[in-house]
Image (cartoon, rainbow, N blue to C red):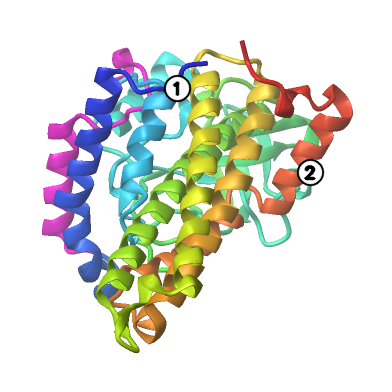
């Protein structure tokens, strides 16, 4: 498999790097110090997203998207993942499962979301249900010409700015009938319970929402009743690959910052980069980034040519596990190289250190990724991981 970037992909990567450095990096301290951005800053970035062609890169052109391949999306997310404050989330990518919505639902939700006129938030996690979706307690009950949804969802990322949710609920409380519903935020019964404070600084929030007997139309089902687990799994596959890409980008930025600092910082008459204690940390990080990036690009190219769903799930798990764990080590070393300055929030390495911690948790913990990989090994043997694709 040739994973060398062709001319078009190399240009796409360059534009993503330019966009990140020109529009996202300058907003990092504002986001950190103010727990978010001003409306004017958000408006400026939104216009730049459209100008650069990075809006809805994961959806078909007929739905208003840019129809980029999964590999091309990885190239873009790798560059944007270098920005702190999760500023990459200013660049909207409507949830992938919405591509399976009816034409009527696409007109109401997906197409406006692709244009940046609406914003979705995926609501799946609950107080008592995280990785094990069979523990979900949110229910949807048929009532005449509609559904009545009841439950509470935690960690609803971007829920503060979203105007509709994709709610993963169990029809009649049956785990075998998991279904995803479109739920408008302004419907009666939808309330924000609270907005917890998190370790990282995120340009948007992760509120807890209650759905108290919220009535939605019968046709507000995404795809069909009982497809919820498949749809959510498809969402996980894409998001896990994007997390892998962003963490590789973040690790690369941390290495650049640490190398630059170590080259200029002097101690005992020498630049500290000349001491093996520092040099070896930088070398370990460089080697780990190289390995993770090679894995990510190979899987990205492979998935772009449509593997079967089970293999995509398995390989996305491996990519997220390897890249997010690697990035945690890389950024931790960068903080160490910076010494006391690395503990100051004004330093990007400090912000990256806090922000990358969640990448080993959300969209499936590292332990869950290991379970997925282990299950594939038991069912299909080691070839899916150790073989080389044709």
> At x 41% / y 14%, what residue is drawn?
103
Query: What residue occupies the far right of the structure in this picture?
Result: 378
Q: Quadrant of residue 180?
A: top right
Which residue bears the numbered disc 1? 3
Say which residue appears at 77% left-offset and 22% top-offset: 383
In this view, the mark in front (1 or 2): 1
Q: Position of residue 259 (x, y in %)?
A: 34, 64
- Between 240 and 166, the one lying in front of the other is 240
Q: Are marks 1 and 2 in contact (CB under 8 Å)?
A: no
Q: Assess whether residue 51 is covered by the magenta stretch.
A: yes
Which element is circle 2 on? helix
Asked whether residue 195 is in view, the answer is no
Residue 388 x/y as whole percent: 65, 20
Horizontally, is 46 left or right of 87 in the view? left
Residue span colored magenta: 37-64
Count the numbered circles shown: 2
Q: Position of residue 352 (x, y in %)?
A: 41, 64
In the picture, the disc for residue 146 is none
Q: Is residue 262 above or below residue 100?
A: below
- Sequence-first tag of 1 and 2: 1
Q: Which residue: 43% across, 75% down? A: 275
- Residue 110 in picture, x, y percent from top left: 37, 27
Seen in the picture, residue 259 relative to 121 is either above or below; the reply is below
Residue displayed at 67% across by 62% down: 127
Report the predominant secondary structure element of the magenta stretch: helix
Q: Is residue 249 magenta?
A: no
Q: Seen in the image, is 218 located left or right of residue 48?
A: right
The residue indicated by pointer 2 is: 371
| Residue at the far bottom in the pictured view | 268
How far apart are labels 1 and 2 at the CA level?
28 Å
Q: Image check: 35 left or right of 382?
A: left
Outermost residue on the front side: it is: 269
């Amino acid at each position: 498999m040739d994973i060398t970037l062709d001319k078009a992909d190399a240009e796409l990567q360059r534009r993503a790097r330019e966009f990140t450095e020109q529009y996202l990096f300058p907003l990092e301290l504002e986001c950190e110090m103010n727990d978010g951005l001003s409306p004017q800053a958000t408006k400026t970035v939104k216009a730049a997203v459209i100008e650069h062609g990075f809006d809805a890169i994961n959806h078909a052109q007929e739905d208003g998207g840019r129809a980029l391949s999964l590999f091309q999306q990885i190239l873009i997310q790798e560059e944007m993942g270098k920005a702190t404050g999760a500023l990459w989330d200013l660049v909207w990518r409507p949830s992938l499962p919405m591509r399976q919505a009816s034409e009527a639902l696409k007109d109401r939700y997906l197409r406006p979301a692709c244009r940046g006129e609406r914003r979705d938030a995926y609501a799946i996690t609950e107080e008592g249900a995280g990785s094990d979706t069979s523990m979900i307690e949110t229910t949807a009950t048929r009532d005449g010409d509609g559904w009545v949804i009841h439950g509470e969802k935690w960690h609803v990322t971007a829920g503060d700015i979203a105007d509709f949710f994709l709610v993963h609920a169990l029809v009649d409380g049956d785990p075998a009938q998991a279904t995803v519903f479109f739920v408008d935020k302004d419907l009666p019964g939808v309330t924000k319970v609270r907005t917890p404070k998190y370790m990282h600084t995120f340009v948007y929030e992760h509120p807890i929402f209650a759905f108290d007997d919220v009535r939605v139309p019968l046709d507000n089902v995404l795809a069909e009743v009982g497809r919820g687990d498949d749809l959510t799994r498809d969402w996980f596959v894409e998001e896990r690959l994007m997390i892998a890409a962003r963490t590789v980008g973040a690790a690369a930025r941390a290495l650049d910052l640490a190398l630059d600092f170590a080259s200029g910082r002097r101690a005992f008459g020498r630049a500290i980069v000349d001491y093996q204690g520092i040099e070896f940390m930088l070398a370990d990080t460089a080697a780990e980034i190289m390995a993770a990036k090679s894995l990510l690009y190979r899987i990205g190219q492979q998935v772009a040519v449509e593997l079967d769903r089970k293999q995509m799930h398995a390989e996305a798990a491996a990519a997220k596990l390897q890249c997010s764990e690697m990035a945690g080590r890389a950024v931790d070393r960068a903080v160490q190289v910076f010494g006391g300055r690395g503990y100051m929030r004004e330093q990007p390495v400090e912000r990256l250190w806090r922000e990358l911690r969640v990448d080993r948790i959300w969209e499936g913990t590292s332990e869950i990724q290991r379970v997925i990989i282990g299950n594939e090994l038991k069912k299909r043997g080691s070839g899916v991981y150790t073989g080389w694709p044709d």
